[in-house]
Amino acid sequence: MKQRIAKFIAHAGIASRRDAEKLIESGAVSVNDEVIKTPATNIDENDVVKINGKKIEQQKNIELYIFNKPLNVMTTVRDPLSRKTIYDILPPEYKHLRYVGRLDYKTTGLLLMTNDGDVVRRLTLPTNQIPRTYIARVGGKNPNLDIARRGATVDGIHYRPMVIDEIAPGKLRITITEGKKNEVRIVLRACGAPVQKLHRESFGNLQLGKLPLGKIIKVSQKDVDLLLKTL
């Protein structure tokens, strides 16, 4: 069965489709030892694909994992300030996984990881509007949370409306569907409720549950299929 070369690279967990196209355009990709220059190239199971001379094997199954990110850990491969990253914590057998979006240095909780670069792209596209739910401890007196509920514009950037429930004094449950950088912190600060602690407890249909900090668990195929069907 024929498929586009960029899709093949993405499903191999090497890069997103967009980044795969850039690799192709740079001349880094060959098919049957011939360098290709167009992402429109189609291949089948008999073709040999290499990136910078290294053969790429197709991933057979999409794997998805839930990682409970601890405090003061960077969601990145390498940090220029030499701070601890998620890959310093993950066991060796999980270090090949790609993270889905980011949780900032001071945010804990559910971080998805996968072996499929195209899944990363699909799960982080704002147009897919996948709900993410956080628990936030906030400061401030008499915050105006309706600013966030209506949809806020801060420093010229518009943020979609958030669902916010006050579950205790100074404690909020917040659901967003966009996932812009530092979105919850920026919008709540604009509401007069600066975030003191932030923890993500769900992503789409996937729940963190009681997974301990710093631990990782594989998502069942049933739940992976359910999540991907929403895209």
Image (cartoon, rainbow, N blue to C red):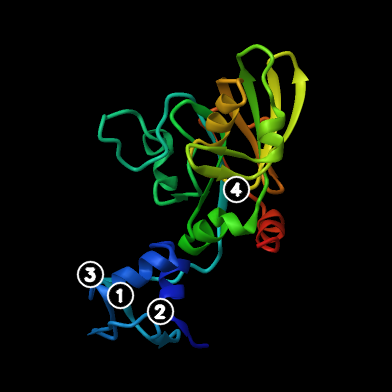
Mark 2–mark 1 CB contact (< 8 Å)? yes
Q: Amino acid at mark 1?
A: Ile
Is disc 1 surrounded by few (<14), some (14 to 19) or many (20+) residues within 10 Å? many
Give x and y (percent) for residue 190: 57, 27
Q: Is residue 12 visible?
A: no
Of 195 and 151, the residue lying toward us: 151
Q: Is residue 212 left or right of residue 149?
A: left
Q: Residue at x 45, y 84 (%)?
A: 45
SS category of the residue bearing label 2? helix
Mark 4–mark 2 CB contact (< 8 Å)? no
Q: Could you tell me how far apart the alpha carbons at marks 1 and 4 are, in whole angstroms? A: 30 Å
Q: Which residue is mark 4?
A: 178
Residue 224 location, quadrant: bottom right
Q: Is residue 231 left or right of residue 108?
A: right
Q: Amino acid at mark 3?
A: Asn
Q: Which residue is mark 1?
A: 24
Q: Of discs 3 and 4, which sits in the foreground?
A: 4
Q: Which residue is mark 3?
A: 52
